[in-house]
Amino acid sequence: MADEPRWEEIFSSQPEGSPADATGTPPAPQSRREARDAENARSSARRAGKARPPRAPRKPGGSKPPRDPGGTAPRRRRWIAWLVAVVAILGLAGGGAAYAWLNFEPQIRKVFGWELPPPDYEGQGTGEATIVIASGDTGVEVTNSLLDAGVIKSFDTFYNLLLVQKPPVEFFPGYYVLAQKMSSAAALAAIQDPSRRVERVALIPEGKSINQVFDILSTATGLPISDFVDAAKDPTSYGVAADAPSLEGYLFPATYKFDPGVDARTVLTTLVNRTFTSLDAAGVAPADRTRVLTIASLIQREAGRNAEDFYKVSRVIQNRLANGMKLQFDSTSHYGYAWKHGEREDGGVFSTNAELTDDNPYNTYVIPGLPIGPIGAAGDLAIDAALHPADGSWLYFVTVNLDTGETVFSDTNAQHEAAVQQLRQWCRTSQSPNCG
């Protein structure tokens, strides 16, 4: 047929409608094999979705052709750059987090609710530690004292334990001997245990002289007697009136508890202030303190065990002073003689001739009126009796039974002499050492 394509056109490698090459020259005719191979290649390319560009011919010598600037190498470099940037950012973030953790761990834990329980020791601890609880110390001060002494491991652990106690813990001043490295619970129990408190107890009985009081204080505190003697040299430094010859009578009889390490002056100050407390409560003016204590000390030494006798002895003192009579108390002759000669009283009831006649400012057998100062420690009962003597006309008295303290009060000397004989008879019968 005239319009039928030629065989060469059917198997040409150039598709229908394809333009000529860049030179305008139509493509060269292909053989059937070449046309078939070209068609198969185009079919394979279409199935793959795109045609792979032909490889550039290698240069002589086998070297690879240069990479395409628009190929995969730039994309790989961009990927590596992003990776480096991410690693750097993560590194900076991690370093900042580490710095924050090291410096602000407690705050961070609190914000996120990651708090750890406060540290604590276990058990009753070992070794020994001493803490001091001062008057008025709160839980904060006590907790710090325990922490400083190595008793507890954590302030928060112990203090938090205090806060939940019902009723609240009451702290008693003093020295406490505990162990080191105790659990908070064990430490709390220990400072509430009275047996853990170290105290120096001094019991001062009524009627004791200043030298006897020094002996008791020295034994209780472990301080030498000379410390108390030296500390007592200036009575006025304790607030005692200038008319007092010494601290005699100003060392109040009571039970005292002192902390370890206390000094003599602190001890004496405690006793003197206790005396002032009693005198103030009784309404004694500072100017009258020495006189009242002097009378009270005589009553304390002379009266028996019966409280009523204290007020009767006080009345005898007032009656004899009012009548211009010497008091003639054996207690003053004993005290004055020992004071003058640097001796200790023998504690006997009857005075020796030397004691009765010794000229000293305390011997009421020699001097008129009251002695120059107290002769011992007077308690509250004697102070009250000195201020409030009983009503009566008695001028004499004598204890007729030293075991029971029975005392006979008399208006006349004859009655008194009869009572003295009653005492002598009792002494012969009882053979009491107090009759010496």
Image (tube, helix red, strand yellow):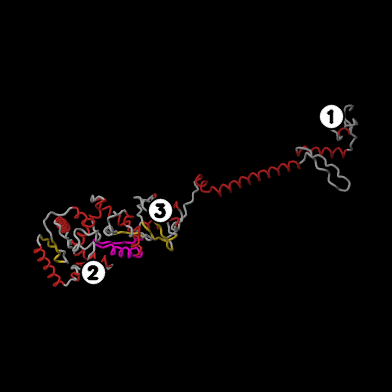
Disc 3 or 2, which lies upstream in sequence?
A: 3
Q: Relative to 217, is 15 above or below?
A: above
Identity, as a three-letter code, of the amino acid under mark 3: Val
Cα distance between the residues tagged 3 and 2: 49 Å
Comparing labels 1 and 2, the label whose residue is closer to the camera: 2
| Label disc, if present, on residue 416 of the rendered structure | none
Q: Position of residue 373 (x, y in %)?
A: 25, 58
Tell me, yes or no, whether the highlighted magenta stretch contains residue 202: yes
User: Which of the 4 quarters of the picture holds residue 297?
Assistant: bottom left
Magenta-tinted stretch: 198-225
Tell me, yes or no, whether the highlighted magenta stretch contains residue 71: no
Q: Residue at x 12, y 58 (%)?
A: 394
Q: Position of residue 233 (x, y in %)?
A: 33, 60
Give neighbour class at mark 1: few <14, some 14-19, many 20+ (Cα, 10 Å).
few
Q: Which residue is mark 1?
A: 17
Disc 1 or 3, which lies upstream in sequence?
A: 1
Q: Residue at x 87, y 29 (%)?
A: 4
Q: Which residue is mark 2?
A: 346
